[in-house]
Image (spheres, helix red, strand yellow):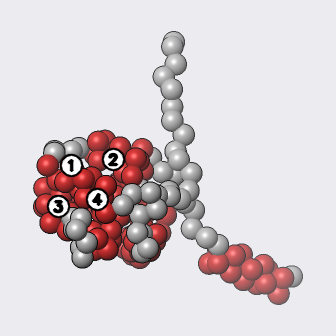
Amino acid sequence: MINFSKKLSFVVGMVALSSQPAHACWTNAAQDAAKIKHLNTMLMVTALRCRNTSDNFLPHYNRFVTKHNNLIGSQNAALKGHLAQTYGARGAEGALDRMSIGFANSYGNGHKTMNCKQLKELAAKLASESHGVVTMAAAADSTVIGHSWSGPACPTRMATRP
C-alpha cells in the first residue's frame, strides 16, 4: 500500500508540474493594453520597413512615441501585470517578449492592408493628437492585423434591478 501511495504522489506531482498555466481571463483593461502594445509594435516595424521609401514615416513614429510615452509605458506595465497572473512575476517578462515578437513578426513583410503612405498618415495623426487608452485602443482596433491577445475575455456583469 505504501508503494501505491508513493506512485500516486509521484504521478500527481508530475501532472502538476507539466500542466499548462491557468490563463487569467482578459479584462477590458488588459485587452486595451494588449491592443496598444500591438499598435505600437506594428507602427515600429512598418516604420522601419518604410524608411527607405518616399513615405518614410520614422520621424512621425518617433514623435508618436515621444508624445505618448507615458501612455505606452503604463499600458505595457498593465499588460505585464496581467501576464503575471498567468505566468507569475518571473514568467511575465518572457510572455511579454514572446507577445511582442509575435506582433513584430506578423508585420515582417509589411502591413497586409495598409501601404507606407497610409501608415505614414496614421502615424502623423496619432503623433499630432492627444489620446487616452480608449482612443488609442480604438485606433488599434481599426489598424492592426490579427488578435492582440489569446485566451478568454472575462465575463461582463450586468446590473440587475432589485
Q: Position of residue 18 (x, y in %)?
A: 64, 78
Residue on which disc 4 sits: 117
Q: Earlier in the sequence, mark 4 or mark 1?
A: 4
Residue on which disc 2 sits: 139
Mark 1 vs mark 3, CA separation in Å: 9 Å
Residue 60's disc is 3
Q: Earlier in the sequence, mark 4 or mark 2?
A: 4
Compare residues 145 and 162 and report the one nearer the observer.
145
Q: Residues within 10 Å of mark 3 (few under 14, many from 20)?
A: many
Asked whether disc 4 touches disc 3, contact meaning CB atoms under 8 Å apart, the reply is: no
- Which type of secondary structure does the marked residue at label 1 adopt? helix
Q: Position of residue 29 (x, y in %)?
A: 37, 47
Q: Residues within 10 Å of mark 4 (few under 14, many from 20)?
A: some
Q: Mark 4 belongs to which amino acid?
A: Lys
Question: Which residue sits furthest right?
Answer: 1
Q: Which residue is found at the position 22% from the left and 68% from the top? A: 54
Mark 2 vs mark 3, CA separation in Å: 16 Å
**As drawn, is 120 to the left or to the right of 149?**
left
Mark 4 vs mark 3: give the one in front.
Answer: 4
Q: Mark 1 belongs to which amino acid?
A: Lys
- Which type of secondary structure does the marked residue at label 3 adopt? helix
- Which type of secondary structure does the marked residue at label 4 adopt? helix
Q: Earlier in the sequence, mark 2 or mark 3?
A: 3
Relative vertical location of residue 91 with respect to residue 146 in this rendering, above or below:
below
Mark 4 vs mark 2: give the one in front.
Answer: 4
Residue on which disc 1 sits: 125
**As drawn, is 105 to the left or to the right of 68?**
right
- Which type of secondary structure does the marked residue at label 2 adopt? helix
Q: Mark 2 belongs to which amino acid?
A: Ala
Compare residues 12 and 159 and report the one nearer the observer.
159
